[in-house]
Amino acid sequence: MVEATPILEVYQVGPTTIVGFGGRDVLDTVNVAVCRDEILALIEKVKCEILAFDLTGVTLLPSGLLGLLTSITKTNVDVHIYNPSEDIQDVLETTKLNTLMEVHQVEVPTPSDESKS
């Protein structure tokens, strides 16, 4: 039996907890309610100060995920967006969500990079 690849990859760099999608554009299949519960539990568990979403390789964000990002900003956690595609940047600007969260183009370390140190 082949195991499914996990959708979310979670790791920490200093005070920042990074949630990534492994460079895969799989967000149209994500159950936002389940994702929301898992992310809110993660925030509480690790006492998250900054939650960054690494969108490397992701081309579209479902509207439910945009709502999730907005709701997280109301939990007193700084939300950052790393490496949004041009289309996602346009959506963030159009919806003014880029005023609620910081948007960056960065090189994000992968968990395998950190294990090499």
Image (cartoon, grey):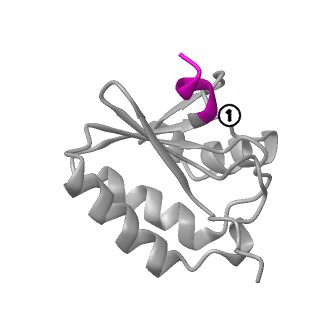
Residue bearing mark 1: 83
Q: In the rendering, at what x and y percent does residue 16 appear?
A: 37, 32
Q: Does the image show residue 98? A: yes
At x 28% / y 64%, what residue is drawn? Answer: 41
Q: Amino acid at mark 1?
A: Asn
Compared with 89, 31 (above or below) is below
Q: Nearer the viewer, residue 79 or 48?
A: 48
Secondary structure under the numbered disc 1 in the rendered image? loop
Quarter residue 90 falls in: top right
Q: In the rendering, at what x and y percent does residue 50 appear?
A: 33, 36
User: How crowded is the residue under tag 1: few (<14 C-alpha within 10 Å), some, or many (20+)?
Assistant: many
Residue farthest front in this picture: 1
Q: Which residues are magenta?
A: 112-117
Q: Does the image show residue 74? A: no
Question: What secondary structure is the stretch in magenta mostly built from?
Answer: helix
Check if residue 76 falls in the magenta segment. Answer: no
Check if residue 116 falls in the magenta segment. Answer: yes
At x 57% / y 58%, what residue is drawn? Answer: 8
Q: Nearer the viewer, residue 113 or 35?
A: 113
At x 75% / y 51%, what residue is drawn? Answer: 58
